[in-house]
């Protein structure tokens, strides 16, 4: 029989558990970058540049350009925040809320023509928020340190 190999205090024994965690971490980063780029390029920029399609959608909702620009700024800030480690969890949570609002708007004002989009993006945002939930605690600790 062989003796188990001892490790120094705090060191992890060599097990297969590190590889799945690393794979999840990498997958989350890929998801965050792709989702962040989507929100910045495909969603925020048309609103912030007042593309005719974006203007038409907000007019159909009965909303003015103020709401269009506000949502564009939120999407831009959130898309960037998805790519900042300490802000990724918070950005995910905020995008879940924004996508719930987008779902309601799609259903109530736009005839549900793109109803799946906010559902899919909301699910991705929820996965990011869950996967980066530790960053929420890190952010809260940082805020407490800065206040006190």
Image (cartoon, helix red, strand yellow):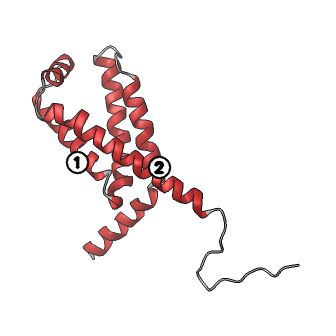
Tag 2 secondary structure: helix
Q: Which of pointers 1 and 2 lies earlier in the amino acid sequence?
A: 2
- Observer-side mark, 1 or 2, equals 2
Circle 2 residue: 27
The quadrant holding residue 121 is top left
Which residue ends up furthest to the right in the rendered image?
1
Mark 1–mark 2 CB contact (< 8 Å): no
- Image quarter where the C terminus lies is bottom left
State left or right for residue 68 relative to residue 133.
Answer: left
Residue 83: give x, y in percent of width and height. 31, 53
Mark 1–mark 2 Cα distance, whole angstroms, equals: 22 Å
Query: What residue lies at 42% left-to-right and 30% top-to-bottom?
Result: 119
Q: Name, please, the residue furthest toward the top.
A: 111
Residue 128 position within the rendered picture, expressed as x and y whole percent measured from the top left: 43, 48
Q: Is residue 78 left or right of residue 92?
A: left
Quick check: 112 above or below 133?
A: above
When the figure is inspected, residue 127 is found, relative to residue 62, above or below; the finding is below
Q: Residue furthest front?
A: 2
Question: Which residue is at a point 13% across and 35% down the rendered structure image?
Answer: 48
Count every numbered label the image shows and give the total.
2
What secondary structure is marked by label 1? helix
Q: Is residue 79 above or below residue 46?
A: below
Q: Position of residue 3 (x, y in %)?
A: 81, 82
Would you call the spot at circle 2 few (<14 residues within 10 Å), some (14-19), or many (20 or more)?
Answer: few
Image disc number at residue 127: none
Query: Which one is nearer the viewer's eye here, 140 or 20?
Result: 20
Disc 1 packing (10 Å; few <14; some 14–19; many ≥20): some
Residue position marked by numbered label 1 in the rendering: 77
Q: Position of residue 25 (x, y in %)?
A: 48, 56
Whether residue 124 is situated above or below residue 5 in the rendered picture: above
């Amino acid at each position: 029989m062989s003796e188990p190999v001892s490790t120094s205090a705090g060191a992890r024994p060599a097990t297969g558990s590190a590889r799945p965690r690393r794979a999840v971490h990498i997958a989350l980063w890929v998801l965050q970058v792709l989702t962040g780029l989507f929100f910045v390029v495909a969603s925020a920029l048309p609103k912030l540049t007042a593309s005719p399609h974006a203007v038409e959608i907000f007019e159909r909702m009965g909303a003015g350009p103020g709401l269009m620009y506000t949502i564009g700024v939120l999407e831009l800030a959130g898309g960037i925040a998805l790519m900042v480690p300490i802000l990724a969890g918070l950005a995910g949570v905020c995008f879940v809320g924004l996508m719930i609002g987008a779902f309601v708007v799609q259903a109530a004002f736009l005839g549900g023509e793109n109803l799946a989009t906010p559902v899919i993006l909301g699910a991705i945002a929820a996965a990011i928020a869950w996967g980066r939930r530790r960053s929420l605690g890190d952010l809260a600790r940082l805020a407490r340190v800065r206040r006190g």
